[in-house]
Image (cartoon, rainbow, N blue to C red):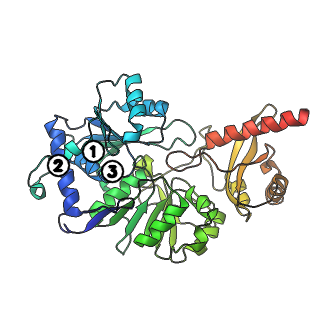
Amino acid sequence: MKKYPEHIIQICHQNGRKFTNREMIQLSVRAALHFEKIQMQQCDIIGMCVSHSDYVAPLFFGAICAGLCISPSDPSYNVNGLKYVYDLTKPKLMFCDGEIYDKVRQAFDECGLTATKIYTVRNHLEGVPDITEFFEEHCNEMSYVVPPLKEGFEQVAMILCTSGSTGSPKGVQMSHAALLNATTLGVDFAPRLLCYSSFYGSVAIFMLIQSATNCFTRIISENPFSPEEFCDIVKQYQINVSANYPAHIPLLLVSDKLATSDLSSLRLMFIAGKTIPYALMEKFMPFARNCTFRTYYGLTEICGAITSSPIDPSDSVGRMLVNTEAKILNDSGEQLGPNETGEILRVICEIPEVVDACVVGIPDETYDFLAAAGVVRRQGATISEQQIAQFVSERRQDYERLRGGLYFFDSFPLTVTGKTNRKEVTEMCITRRGVEERDKSV
């Protein structure tokens, strides 16, 4: 960043504000000095529950420089979700957007963190301290020297939570050394990055770090993902690298905006968190013809990726990366071989009228669990449950038939990292099955 001080590192889509590397360094150093002024010690934990906005990046860099540990959460969390995270990490300071201050304060009070001071990052409130006081320290920022880490490079820099797609999120401790391993994107052009992952997600953290270490320009939006805004930003800023969640693709496919949008600047789109059926990606690819599509898996768990490869008809989560070992176990701890699960989902997504699907197991008194599927149809599609079930039956083994039922939904609930919340979809299918069985008995 010091080598190219006039490079634009960040642009906010909503207000158009641009930060150069010099400005980002100045704000980050001032934040680090203010942490020292208020006697925050290395390894102390701070919480962040924020959307992307102007001052999130310098706050992050300032905390890292000060040797603090950051515990982020997502603004969509309710009080119980916030209590779950921060009852574990117990931050000494908390930063949040003004519009969620009340629920953050309530969550902290209910888990005994009444002494934790909470600052707003945007949409400030009267009588509540805000982030601007962190940028009032003045010094020669360009000559600032980051103090040595008390515990070396293995000192914990962040505690990130997994997505919670199948249960409660798990906290993952990430060291400074691990974050440094996430500094390369592996492209031979100057990216203009777009990432809709909230600051809670590992993808957003890695994009932020890469923009600083590689002189990339990062475009941020204060809004959650929407197909319309995504298409507008790609065209306006000529985005060439986009980080997306699997759930974004079905939303784009059902949007009227996609057909009239210019996505020709996209050169790399990577899908993180889980695999996405190739049948869905194949429907999207014609709208971004200059783009390569890759999948990355295991980002939060190992602070990088376990696998990565181009998205192809194999529907794999990717090839194992160099110096990486893994094994896949079932619920009984037994090792699984290739192609033992996931085949039903792939078949359903081949149907042109289907834009998203989720295959789950629902309890049954006789057979323990039965295969069931939730399906989101393309807008205006008339294909029936029976037609999809027949399509699957003709292509899969008898034991893979959807004997637990097939149910249409307008959309699927998502985790804060954009994955389909399989636990909630399972409950939705169980509820729908119960309603249909009651209707039959009447």
Q: Are marks 3 and 2 in contact (CB under 8 Å)?
A: no
Name the amino acid type tagged 2: Arg
Tell me if residue 295 can be seen. Answer: no
Q: Position of residue 77 (x, y in %)?
A: 48, 38
Q: Mark 1 or mark 3, which has the lower sequence index?
A: 1
User: Residue beneath label 2, please?
Assistant: 30
Q: How dense is the environment of label 1, judged by Cα within 10 Å: few (below 14), some, or many (20 and up)?
A: few
Q: Quadrant of residue 314?
A: bottom right
Q: Mark 2 or mark 1, which has the lower sequence index?
A: 2
The residues tagged by marks 3 and 2 sit, at their Cα atoms, a distance apart of 25 Å
401 and 20: which is toward the camera:
20
The residues tagged by marks 2 and 1 sit, at their Cα atoms, a distance apart of 25 Å
Tell me if residue 156 can be seen. Answer: yes
User: Residue beneath label 3, please?
Assistant: 178
- 374 above or below 1? above
Q: Position of residue 61 (x, y in %)?
A: 25, 51
* Residue located at (37% from left, 42% from top): 97
User: Residue beneath label 1, please?
Assistant: 154
* Residue located at (61% from left, 72% from top): 259
- 21 above or below 97? below
Determine the secondary structure under disc 1. Answer: helix
Q: Position of residue 263 (x, y in %)?
A: 51, 73
